[in-house]
Image (cartoon, helix red, strand yellow):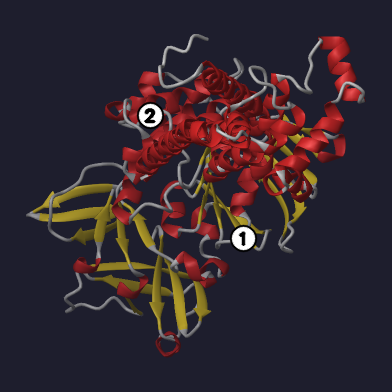
């Protein structure tokens, strides 16, 4: 963690690398669950589908602070889940960087599911039927047909979740707090700087960096979409 | 032991009901009926892609489904190959990987076909490295057929394999199907709503309407029933006479059909087999006596087998060794006193005939 880049101070560098670490973990940990959820939502005709759909999308419309509050209650060491995690695995969620991962994963989950679900919906489910009639079991058909065909959707969903996680603020500050060097991601650092008297002038570098990263993620995802469109033709 | 025993009942959410009992021995059987008659549903039930509410399906002595006994094999455990109407090739795999897809998961009990022989018969060797999106409709359908064959099925199901192709292509792909049948003898059940395909390829036909069995039997007999003529999308009866022999005499092409000699339009002679003469029922003139002094070259005499009136037209089936359809007005039919068993002569202009292979 040596600040080789002269533009960034040690504190800024720490925030940047923590943000990357959190976003990477959040998007990657959410991916398998998002894939399964999206596949189920794309293919199922279950009567309770609308309920699952609503539940998945809830973090998208709820204030992130509220999501964070609920997570805090669920995962505090005094709660059954939080207590279990702490005593069995020694994992601390609240006021730790893992809490920031959890918050970012939950908040970005609906975006990831949307992108992946769209990709599954665009592939003909009869292709999997064809695979089954050729002797492939349901899991094999999923792994060899549905998943590769939705590949670009998976990448787009991951990128979207990654970008969203980089910017996560409300839920993160509730669950992980704002501890410098431990849970202070870039948005939290901007917030902290802006609250200081002389901080507004220092915040611009992180603000610029955030904008740059967001543009980069959008650009990459746009590029993938476009290549996908060409490929589809 | 019959090849296929099928007995299923199912009520679809839209109110359509399928209730059908079938027993097939034939090698190349056609399920023939109008759109929405339930033909494709039957295939999908045999393949295990949908399950009927009640029923029993056996293929080559193996019970695939028996709702009473609570038995229902998943599609991958049924030795049934499916060729889909739109071929459904896997777009992310090359033609070769598509063809070998079934090979990878095939159970040992399935019959194994030689890969090289399949691509040879279907003439797809040049396509192996390409992706499905770059293939023409006919090529896609051949690859789809090859893929199903290479999974080594006991029964091949084809869901309107020719419906999405244009007419010249249809004939060519049909010729491939016939080669496949004669090469490997895999029992085949194919769905179609085109009479020409049934007459040309099938040795057994099952007539289906509204989810019910109307009739089954050999095409010559079943297709003379009145029902198929009323199906708006079957384009009425077609005349497709199988040519037994073709020869050139003094610059004229002469085909032998059921003891008759038919003069064909001038042109390059095809010696491929099977060969068919195709013409419209409207191109046939009927006469009580064989008349001379007419420009039409071909006079075929036979007995009237069937008279069917449909919306202002009378369709007449004449047995000239093979069944031939003519369409006349009701007035003409009564003037000629057409009746079943009557001997009539069919006059065919050379230029109304076309030769297809």
Chain hosting mark 1: B
Circles 2 and 1 in contact, beta carbons < 8 Å: no
In the depicted structure, whether residue B227 falls above or below residue B24 = below
Residue drawn at x 51%, y 61% as measured from the top left? B223
Give the letter of the chain under mark 2.
B
Q: Is residue A20 visible?
A: yes
Whole-angstrom CA distance, mark 2 to mark 1, is 33 Å
* Residue to which mark 1 is pinned: B37
Quadrant including the N terminus of chain B: top right
Residue B138, horizontal then vertical, whole percent = 34, 43
Q: Is residue B48 visible?
A: no
Residue placed most toward the observer, A213 or A26: A213
On screen, residue B167 above or below B329: above
Sequence-first tag of 2 and 1: 1
Identify the residue at image location x=49%, y=35%. Answer: A201
Q: Is residue B234 left or right of residue A180?
A: left
Which of label 2 and label 1 is nearer to you? 2
Q: Which residue was labeled with disc 2?
A: B95
- Depicted B278 relative to depicted B245: above or below: below
Coordinates of residue B114 in the picture (x, y in percent): 42, 18
Number of residues whose C-alpha sits closer than 10 Å to that of mark 1, classed few (under 14), some (14–19) or many (20 or more) = many
Q: Which mark is residue A2?
A: none
Please rate how many residues cluster around mark 2, counting C-alpha atoms within 10 Å: few if below 14, some from 14 to 19, many from 20: many
Q: Is residue B58 left or right of residue A148?
A: right
Q: Nearer the viewer, residue A206 or B137?
A: A206
Of helix, strand and loop, which one carries label 1?
A: loop
Residue A50 point in image, percent of width and height: 75, 50
How many numbered discs, if any? 2
Q: Give x and y (percent) for residue B305.
A: 49, 68
The residue nearer to you, when weighing B280 against A198, is A198
């Amino acid at each position: 963690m040596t600040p080789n880049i002269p533009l960034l101070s040690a504190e800024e560098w720490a925030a940047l690398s923590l943000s990357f670490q959190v976003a990477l973990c959040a998007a990657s940990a959410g991916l398998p669950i998002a894939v399964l959820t999206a596949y189920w939502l794309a293919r199922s005709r279950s009567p309770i589908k609308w309920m699952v759909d609503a539940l998945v999308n809830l973090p998208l419309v709820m204030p992130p602070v509220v999501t964070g509050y609920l997570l805090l209650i669920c995962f505090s060491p005094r709660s059954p889940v939080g207590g279990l995690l702490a005593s069995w695995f020694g994992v601390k969620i609240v006021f730790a960087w893992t809490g920031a991962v959890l918050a970012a994963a939950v908040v970005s989950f609906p975006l990831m599911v949307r992108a992946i679900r769209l990709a599954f919906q665009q592939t003909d489910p009869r292709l999997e039927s064809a695979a089954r009639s050729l002797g492939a079991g349901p899991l094999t058909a999923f792994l060899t047909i549905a998943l590769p065909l939705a590949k670009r959707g998976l990448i787009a969903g991951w990128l979207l979740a990654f970008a969203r996680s980089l910017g996560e603020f409300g839920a993160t500050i509730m669950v992980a707090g704002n501890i410098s060097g431990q849970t202070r991601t870039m948005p939290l650092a901007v917030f902290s700087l802006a609250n200081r008297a002389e901080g507004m002038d220092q915040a611009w570098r992180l603000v610029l960096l955030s904008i740059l990263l967001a543009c980069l993620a959008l650009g990459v995802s746009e590029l993938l979409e476009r290549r996908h469109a060409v490929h589809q033709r | 032991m019959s090849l296929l025993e099928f007995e299923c009942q199912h009520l679809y959410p839209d109110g359509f009901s399928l209730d059908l009992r079938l027993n097939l021995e034939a090698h190349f059987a056609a399920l023939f009926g109008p759109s929405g008659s339930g033909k494709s549903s039957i295939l999908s039930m045999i393949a295990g892609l949908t399950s009927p509410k009640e029923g029993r399906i056996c293929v080559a002595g193996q019970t695939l489904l028996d709702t009473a006994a609570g038995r229902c094999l998943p599609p991958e455990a049924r030795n049934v190959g499916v060729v889909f109407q739109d071929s459904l090739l896997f777009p992310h795999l090359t033609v070769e990987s598509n063809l070998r897809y079934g090979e990878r998961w095939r159970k040992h009990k399935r019959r194994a076909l030689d890969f090289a022989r399949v691509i040879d018969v279907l003439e797809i060797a040049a396509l192996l490295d390409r992706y499905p999106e770059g293939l023409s409709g006919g090529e896609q359908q051949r690859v789809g057929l090859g893929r199903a064959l290479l999974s080594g099925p006991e029964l091949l199901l084809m869901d309107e394999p020719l419906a999405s192709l244009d007419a010249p292509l249809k004939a060519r792909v049909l010729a491939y199907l016939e080669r496949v049948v004669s090469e490997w003898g895999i029992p085949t059940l194919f769905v179609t709503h085109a009479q020409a395909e049934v007459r040309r390829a099938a040795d057994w036909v099952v007539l289906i309407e509204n989810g019910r069995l109307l009739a089954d039997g050999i095409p010559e007999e079943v297709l003379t029933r009145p029902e198929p003529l009323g199906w708006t999308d079957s384009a009425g009866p077609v005349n497709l006479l199988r040519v037994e022999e073709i020869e050139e005499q003094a610059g004229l092409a002469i085909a032998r059909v059921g003891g008759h000699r038919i003069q064909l339009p001038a042109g390059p002679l095809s010696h491929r087999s099977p060969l068919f003469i195709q013409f419209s029922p409207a191109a046939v003139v009927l006469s009580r006596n064989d008349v001379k002094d007419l420009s039409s070259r071909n006079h075929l005499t036979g007995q009237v087998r069937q008279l069917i009136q449909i919306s202002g037209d009378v369709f007449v089936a004449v047995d000239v060794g093979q069944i031939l359809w003519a369409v006349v007005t009701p007035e003409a039919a009564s003037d000629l006193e057409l009746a079943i068993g009557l001997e009539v002569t069919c006059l065919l202009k050379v230029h109304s005939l076309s030769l297809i292979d």
